[in-house]
Image (cartoon, rainbow, N blue to C red):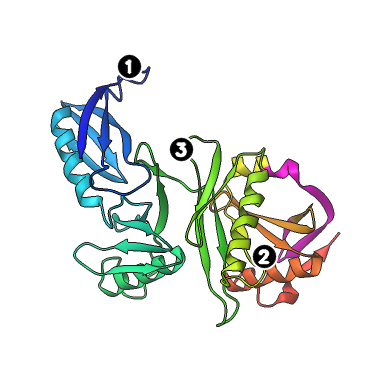
Amino acid sequence: MKVFLEQNSDTNSNNQPFFAHIEVSNVSVDFNTRFRVPISQRVNGTTSYLAEICGFQVEAESPNAVILLIEKLVLELVNFARLPTYVFIARRSHKMYPVYTYEDEVFATTPGGPVFKHVELAKVREYLSDYMHTIGALGAPGASETLHVRGVHRETLGLVRPIFYLKKRPQGDDENEFWAPVFPSKTGQSIYAYAVNGRREVDIDNGHEVLLLRSQVAQALVADKRLKEDYDLRADRLLPEYWERVKPNLEAVLSKLAYNGSQFDVYKEGKYLVAVEYRDREDRYSLYIGKGVDDLRERAAKDLIRRKLAKSVTDVSVVG
């Protein structure tokens, strides 16, 4: 492995005076083996230098000392001959857990403990969360601290917030849960998610990419018999700026879904309908997809019942 310093000549050089160039081809079989990590400077009485690798921070009194810490940290993070694809974060407990993808499985590691693996990221998060709560690492058993997911940028190794999630909640014992975060590519020219033994990716296309990626992943899951129907997979918690890209591509219809004093706008997109819920707590948008109004109403109602915002399907009505 090679790690060396590069002077930053950009306009932000006062705050980030250096980059760390990292070459890991001899310890990793990842497609990406070269990284360029910003090194920041902090002045508080004394000057120190900081870098962040997959969410883990190192700090030292000199840039060269930071380089040594980076090399040590990268070697510790390499697992299955790979660097993490994701990181699970427990905010309240201030803990982070690297997550790796290898062939068609996802692995989460714990410090000195077991490794959890499954083909679904959602299941790995569930297993890891249950275990860490049981041993008291995330509070008492039965506590509800959520593990949040972040992607790892494939050039800077910084953490990336998901644009949205692709999600399927099981409605019965014979159904699988699916949950995958969607991220922008390092070039910003496409978006992607990992599903069914591969990276599923579509080019940026004026907002069309959100529903195109949803459809691509849904078809892959149906073919793999992990999803019964295309419309079972939905785009969840879309960032507001991304919803503004998607919205002009949809045709508004007069009907709305209503429950408990709230309404979801309904749009038409090709052969299906889309109901849009704004979640003010997260400042994100969730999309429900159905073949027609009745199918759409039932799908939205089942999710509201799961979240204990409705008691039955009849609580959700079509108005307008």
Magenta segment includes 260: yes
Please tell me whether residue 101 is drawn above or below residue 61 in the rendered image: below
> How far across and how far down the image is residue 28, in percent?
28, 48
Give the amino acid at mark 2.
Answer: Asp
First of labels 2, 1 by sequence position: 1
Q: Nearer the viewer, mark 2 or mark 1?
A: 2
Magenta extent:
246-264
**Crowdedness near tag 1: few (<14), some (14–19) or many (≥20) residues, C-alpha within 10 Å:** few
Q: CA distance from mark 1 to mark 3?
A: 21 Å
User: Mark 2 to mark 1: distance in Å?
Assistant: 49 Å
Q: Is residue 316 visible?
A: no
Q: Is residue 140 left or right of residue 283?
A: left
Residue 106 sits in quarter: bottom left
- According to the picture, the residue beneath numbered tag 2 turns out to be 230
Instruction: Give, as a three-letter code, the residue at label 1.
Output: Ser
Which of disc 2 and disc 3 is earlier in sequence?
3
The answer to which quarter of the image holds residue 142 is: bottom left
SS state under label 1 = loop
Task: Give the labeled residue for mark 3.
Answer: 186
Q: Residue at x 29, y 58 (%)?
A: 93
Residue 228 in view: yes
| Residue 51 image point, x, y percent | 26, 36
Q: Which is more toward the observer, 114 or 303?
A: 114
Q: Within 10 angstroms of label 2, few (less than 14), some, or many (20 or more) residues? A: some
